[in-house]
Amino acid sequence: MSNLVLLIKVMQMTEDERKVLKGKMEELIPALAKEIEDLKELTQPIAPENAIGRISRMDAINNRSVKLAALRKAEIRLHALKDALSNVDKPDFGICIRCNSSIPIGRLLLRPQSKSCVNCAH
Ligand SMILES: [Zn+2]
């Protein structure tokens, strides 16, 4: 066994931690999917000016672009979460892709889609 594999084995999260993390993902994914559905509803095309007035229309356009940005972010996050869920049972899950150290379980619970530790994230 190479030193790296040994190192990963030593620092791996426990099976209990993995279970908790998996549960967290399974809880976050449908919640986020729902949020995306809601945002899609809220970002429908805006009624013409003569129907709602110029000022409300400008407000609506501003609101819509904020919500569109949120929608895009949520979609990226959902994709990353699903990806994380499909990888959570792999032995190298939770290992920082940059420095190979294990990502603290606290960070993974907050952001299960994290692929790097806090030090490497910025
Ligand atoms: Zn790292």
Image (spheres, helix red, strand yellow):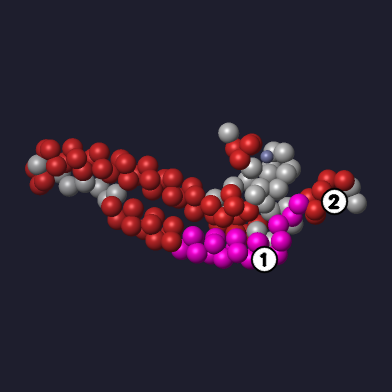
Residue under label 2: 6
Quarter-of-image position of residue 48? top left
Give yes or no for residue 83 being in the magenta stretch.
Answer: no
Q: Which of marks 2 and 1 is nearer the N terminus?
A: 2
For the C terminus, the quadrant is top right
Q: Is residue 60 left or right of residue 51?
A: right
Ligand 1 visible in quadrant:
top right
Q: Disc 1 residue type?
A: Asp
Classify 10 Å Cα crowding around label 1: few (below 14), some (14-19), many (20 and above).
few
C-alpha span from label 2 to label 1: 20 Å
Q: Is residue 34 visible to the viewer in this orientation of the structure? A: yes
Segment tinted magenta in the rendering: 11-30
Which residue corresponds to the image point at 69% horizontal and 42% vertical from the top-left? Answer: 97
Q: Residues within 10 Å of mark 2 (few under 14, many from 20)?
A: few
Considering every residue shown, the one lying at the far right of the view is: 1
Q: Which residue is drawn at 54% across and 62% down?
A: 24
> Element type at marker 2?
helix
Total numbered labels placed on residues in the image = 2
Q: Is residue 23 magenta?
A: yes
Where in the figure is residue 7, as x and y percent of width and height?
82, 48
User: Can you see residue 83?
Assistant: no
Residue 47: give x, y in percent of width and height: 17, 47
What's the magenta bit mostly, secondary-structure-wise? helix
Task: Residue 18: give x, y in percent of width and height.
Answer: 66, 62
Pointers 2 and 1 in contact (C-beta within 8 Å): no
Near-viewer residue (4 or 67) = 4
- Res 16 label: 1
What kind of element bears circle 1?
Answer: helix
Q: Name above or below for residue 113 compared with residue 69.
A: below
Residue at the image position 64 percent from the left and 42 percent from the top: 117
103 with respect to 81 (left or right):
right
